[in-house]
Amino acid sequence: MKVKNKKNIFRSDCPISSALDLFGDKWSLLIIRDLVYFGDRTFKDFSNADEKISSARLSDRLCKLDKLELLTKSNHPTNKKVYIYRLTSKGMDLFPVIAEYVKWSNKYLNDHIAEPAKQFATMLEDDREGTLDKFMKK
Amino acid sequence: MKVKNKKNIFRSDCPISSALDLFGDKWSLLIIRDLVYFGDRTFKDFSNADEKISSARLSDRLCKLDKLELLTKSNHPTNKKVYIYRLTSKGMDLFPVIAEYVKWSNKYLNDHIAEPAKQFATMLEDDREGTLDKFMKK
DNA sequence: CTGTATCCTTAGGGATACTG
DNA sequence: CAGTATCCCTAAGGATACAG
């Protein structure tokens, strides 16, 4: 059954298409990635990522992910001009999705993927549950 | 290090962004989903999915996924006008990605997701490895 | 530094008609 | 039935300037 009453962003009631409708754009998952990899981040931190997102795009994605409650925004303890973005548990629960992307890419895009990422993938492969737990705790 | 020599579709050498660059569009993963859920599919089968992809879009996505070797296209045994699309092992290896999306959505989009999908997610949750294996074999 | 606002370009995608 | 070819529109995204 297709869901299309009122302004519905969902194409259907399929969990996969619904997830994609929420954060299946070109940037959202990469922002989540940074928070998963590195923990708390500032606007500038995100801007410095290799993919070079534009400030306008970064701005509205952070806003969107905040609304989706995948991350929170709070003040820097000392510098009033800097904000800290942090994953919520809801956002953290996207870690397995990220991890599976990494593992797939490591297997099939190996000649393209950078060495540190490969090591990360191998780490995940070696001891899935254990590594995942350790990673999530830090 | 950013990869941008010649015509490179990859924004960086990050495994996640690279995977997204390959099949992070609005439709590719849903085509994979159908193949994972239901096995071999025809053009018409895909067209009948709830999300109602247009024929033009379906056509070029199937072509793209074929080039990426995520699926194969072969003739129907009896009907010469019908083609059969089948997952390759490379495509099958995207099952875990799909499964993690399903599990996340089941947890956080529960009031929106249809009952059969919830059951599928619960099934995955209950016995991850076992169910996965069983599922992949059929 | 952290955003917005603006402008503009492009890619993605829907609708339709059509061919083999 | 399985596509392909248009046409057109919109959303997504890049560049830039600028404001708090």
Image: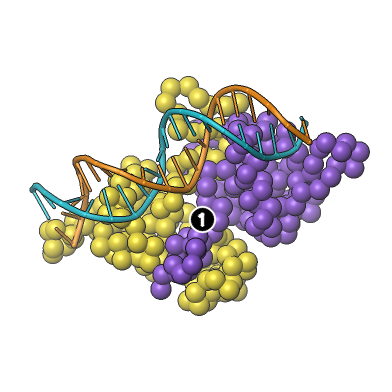
Chain colours: A purple, B yellow, C cyan, D orange
Q: Which residue is mark 1?
A: A20
Of all residues shown, which one is farthest toward the right?
A: A78
Q: Quadrant of residue A117?
A: top right
Residue D15 locus on image (x, y percent): 55, 24
Residue B105 locus on image (x, y percent): 57, 65
Residue B101 as seen in the image, left or right of residue B67: right
The quadrant of the image that shows the N terminus of chain B is: top right
* Rendered residue at 41%/73% (across/down): A1
Height in image: B95 above or below B64?
A: below
* Rendered residue at 83%/36% (across/down): A81
Residue A55 locus on image (x, y percent): 64, 34
Height in image: A40 above or below B124?
A: above
Please state which amino acid type lies under the numbered disc 1.
Answer: Leu
* Rendered residue at 90%/42% (across/down): A77
Height in image: B138 above or below A67?
A: below
Q: Badge 1, how many Cα within 10 Å: few under 14, some, many 20+?
A: many
Which is more toward the observer, B113 or B63? B113
Mark 1 falls on what kind of element?
A: helix
The quadrant of the image that shows the C terminus of chain B is: bottom left
Residue B72 as seen in the image, left or right of residue B92: left
Residue B79 seen by the camera: yes
Which is more toward the observer, A47 or D8? D8
Q: Please give the chain letter of the residue carrying mark 1.
A: A
* Rendered residue at 62%/45% (across/down): A61
Height in image: A136 above or below A3?
A: above
Residue B44 locus on image (x, y percent): 25, 62
Count of all numbered marks drawn on residues in the image: 1
Residue B46 as seen in the image, left or right of residue D3: right
Which is more toward the observer, B115 or A109? B115
Q: Quadrant of residue A51?
A: top right
Residue B135 seen by the camera: no
